[in-house]
Structures are given as C-alpha cells and as structure tokens.
C-alpha cells in the first residue's frame, strides 16, 4: 500500500500520544498523508517542508523521532541529520529517500540515521520502522538511567566506605590513646593512693614523732617511685633521635664497664668479659647504647638473687656487630617472653616495666634488633644487633 495512493479517514489525536514525531518533507501531499496515518495510530505529528523549518521547530519543541526526506531545498536532509545528531543525540532519525538512491541511503546510515526507506514506501513498514526506532531509543534511555543509578550507588557506597574508614582510624587512634592512659593511670594510682592515705593520717596528727617520721618516709618513697615512673615514661615518649657516630662496640662496652661493675660486685655476681678484637665500627649513639646495656645488666643482676655469672660479650653479626648480656639467673617463662617488651610489663615490686620497652625502642632507632633467648632455671641472653655501616 503506497502512501501517496492511500486515502484514510481522519481520526482524532488521542490525548496521550504514543510519541511526538517531526516529519520534514517538501512533498506536501505525501507528508500530509503520512501524518494522517500516523495520527490515526496514536502519534502526534508535526510536518515541515524544509530543513531550516525543521531546525526552527526542533529548537522550540521536543520530539521523540525525526522523519526526514533527503532532498529538500535549503538545508537538506543530510545537513539536518548532522544538526540533530549534534544537538539532540537522543532523537532517532528515519530517512526517506526518493528515486531509490542507494548511495544517499547508505550515506545517511553512515551519518547516524536509524534506518531508511525509499519512496514509495509501504506504510506498515514505516510503522514497524518507527516502532523499532522508538523501542530502541526507550531501551537506550532506560539503560543509561540504570547505568546512572548504578554509578550513583557505587559513588554513594564508596563515600560511605571512605567515611567509615576515617571514623575507624580516628576510633583506633582514640582507642590506642585510651589504652595508654588507662595503663598509666593504673601505674600512678597505687603510689598516689598510698601517699594520699599516709598524708591524711599525718594531717589527723600522728601519735608520736617516730610514727610521723615513718609516715613521712613512706610518702617520700612513693613520691620517688612516681618520679621514677614519670622519668621513664618521658624517656619512652621522647623520640630522641640518636646522634650516630662510627664506633667500635668493644671500645664502647669496655669504657662503660665502670658504670655497673660496682652494682655487679655488690650483688655477689661474677663478671665475665668476652671481647672480640677488631670488630668493624658501627654507627651508634654512645650515650643511648650505654643506657641500654645498663638496663640489661641491671635486669640480669636482678634475675640472679642468689648470685651467678654475668657475661658481657661483643661479637660479629653478619657485616655488623652485636653486644650480648648473658646471665645464669631465673630465666623467663614462655608466656612472659611474649610481653617482655610491652611498656609497664614487670614482675618486680618496684619495677616500672619500661626498661626493656625503652631499650627496644632505642635499638630500633639505630636500625638494629634486640633479641632474647631464655631457659627457665638456667638463664637468659639478650643480644643487641647493630647493622653494618653503609659504605
Ligand atoms: N635477664 C632477665 N631474666 C629474667 N627476667 C627478666 C630479665 N630481664 C627482664 N626480665 C623480665 O622482664 C620484665 C620487664 O623488664 P623491664 O626491664 O622492662 O622492667 P623491670 O626491670 O621490671 O622494671 P625497671 O626496668 O623499671 O626496673 C622484668 O620484670 C622481668 O620479669
Ligand atoms: Mg629493668
């Protein structure tokens, strides 16, 4: 059924059109017939007879589909299509060509036309082509809507996760601070409670001068303990960067012996020295390493309440050097080994439990390691490993 030859009865355009179509064709009769047929099928159709007119209409109203003739005066169908593709990329275009010009039809498809029909065309085929073009457009719109929604969802989730991470990090930091505060509070509470209790008794008035002196002595003792805790805590918190200088570890240890020889003798402990000659120099902060050795020696002496032997040794360790402090004391049980370097871990009534924590931090500051091995009842070995000097 060729459109030009068809006369169809007029029918009213329904209130809700199936789609709005702009039809551009300079063959007025054909355009009118096609419009009537489409309107009968529920489309709202506007006709124009040139490309320029089509451009004007497109600027004023919005359309779901453009049907255009290729050959028109002024702006022709090809130019109109370029305009539509650029300005209204979501609007599909169906091209109708006269004289069965295959070449121009192919060119139209290349320029982005959805499909083409050659005149004279069958109305039913035109209808199917329109429906297919609109359906494809609808699916494309739906797909891009879904994609947008999906992107939005992904963005929302990403934002949520980022916020959660920030909150978690803040929480973790708070938790770490909280843990430290509770440990410190615990350490400080005992001496404070003692000082408070004895001070109140003093205030009430002690029975005699001897008791007053006793109470005052306990208070002084507890204050000393608090001061010791405070000093160790400050040492621990201080991130004092080591001042590294090349030094022979054997020379350093030999020079430091005077620091603790007295303490070792007093404890009735035998001191043995095993120095490796010609050790390579390593980078170290003399004051800091001396402090670490002193801590290890005091721990060793305290682990030998009934005497024993303390060995201080220097050895090679890879390209670097090591300083060892070994005792024949009580040894350390497995469960305690796991907590040895924790701040405030102590088994001693007057210990702060910061000695080894500070020692480890200092050695790490030197790029080295503090190793321990121990056997219950036989003794312990602490080894300071210092890396070789960079060449
Ligand atoms: N040579 C050792 N032999 C056995 N146990 C040890 C030895 N060195 C350390 N320890 C154990 O490790 C714990 C922690 O030692 P650390 O030096 O950190 O604190 P501390 O000696 O208890 O207190 P502070 O050093 O303040 O006097 C000690 O209480 C002790 O139980
Ligand atoms: Mg100690």
Image: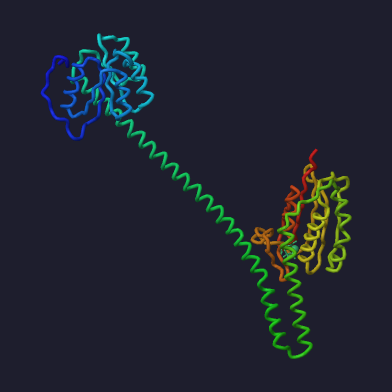
**The N terminus lies in quadrant:** top left
Total numbered circles: 0
In percent of width and height, residue 94 lies at 28, 20
Q: Is residue 156 left or right of residue 26?
A: right
Q: Which of the 4 image quarters holds residue 219? A: bottom right
* Of 327 and 281, the residue lying toward us: 281
Q: Is residue 335 left or right of residue 205?
A: left
Q: Is residue 198 left or right of residue 105?
A: right
In percent of width and height, residue 96 lies at 26, 16
* Of 251 and 85, the residue lying toward us: 85
| Position of 224 relative to 246 (above/below) | below
Furthest-left residue in view?
Answer: 9
| Residue for point 75% across, 56% down | 382
In percent of width and height, residue 227 lies at 75, 69
| Residue for point 19% across, 25% down | 38
Q: Is residue 276 left or right of residue 170?
A: right
Q: Which of the 4 image quarters holds residue 26? A: top left
Quadrant of ligand 1 in image: bottom right
Q: Which of the 4 image quarters holds residue 72? A: top left
| Residue for point 69% across, 65% down | 346
């Amino acid at each position: 059924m060729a459109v030009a030859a068809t006369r169809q009865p007029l029918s009213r355009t329904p209130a809700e059109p199936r789609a709005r179509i702009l039809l551009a064709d300079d063959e007025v009769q054909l355009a009118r017939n096609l419009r009537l047929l489409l309107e009968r099928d529920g489309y709202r159709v506007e006709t124009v007879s040139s490309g320029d007119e089509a451009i004007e209409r497109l600027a004023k109203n919005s359309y779901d589909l453009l049907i255009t003739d290729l050959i028109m005066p002024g702006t022709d169908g090809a130019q109109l299509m370029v305009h539509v593709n650029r300005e209204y990329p979501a609007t599909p275009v169906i091209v109708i060509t006269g004289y069965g010009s295959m070449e121009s039809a192919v060119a139209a498809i290349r320029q982005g036309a959805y499909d083409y029909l050659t005149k004279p065309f069958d109305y039913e085929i035109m209808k199917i082509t329109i429906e297919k073009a609109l359906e494809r457009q609808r699916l494309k719109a739906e797909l891009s809507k879904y994609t947008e929604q999906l992107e939005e969802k992904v963005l929302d989730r990403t934002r949520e996760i980022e916020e959660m991470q920030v909150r978690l990090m803040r929480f973790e930091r708070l938790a770490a601070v909280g843990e430290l505060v509770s440990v410190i509070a615990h350490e400080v509470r005992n001496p404070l409670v003692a000082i408070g209790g004895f001070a109140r008794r003093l205030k009430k008035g002690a029975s005699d001068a001897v008791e007053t002196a006793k109470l005052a002595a306990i208070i002084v003792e507890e204050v000393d303990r608090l001061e010791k805790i405070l000093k160790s805590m400050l040492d621990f918190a201080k991130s004092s960067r080591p001042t590294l200088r090349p030094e022979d570890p054997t020379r350093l240890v030999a020079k430091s012996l005077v620091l603790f020889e007295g303490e070792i003798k007093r404890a009735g402990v035998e001191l043995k020295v095993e120095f490796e000659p010609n050790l390579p120099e390593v980078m170290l902060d003399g004051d800091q390493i001396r402090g670490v050795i002193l801590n290890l020696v005091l721990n060793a002496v305290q682990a030998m309440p009934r005497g024993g032997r303390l060995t201080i040794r220097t050895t090679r360790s890879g390209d670097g050097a090591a300083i060892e402090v070994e005792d024949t004391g009580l040894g350390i049980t497995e469960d305690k080994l796991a907590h040895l370097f924790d701040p405030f871990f102590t088994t001693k009534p007057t210990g702060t439990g910061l000695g080894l924590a500070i020692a480890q931090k200092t050695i790490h500051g030197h790029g080295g390691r503090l190793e321990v091995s121990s056997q219950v009842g036989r003794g312990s070995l602490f080894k300071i490993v210092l890396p070789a000097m960079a060449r």
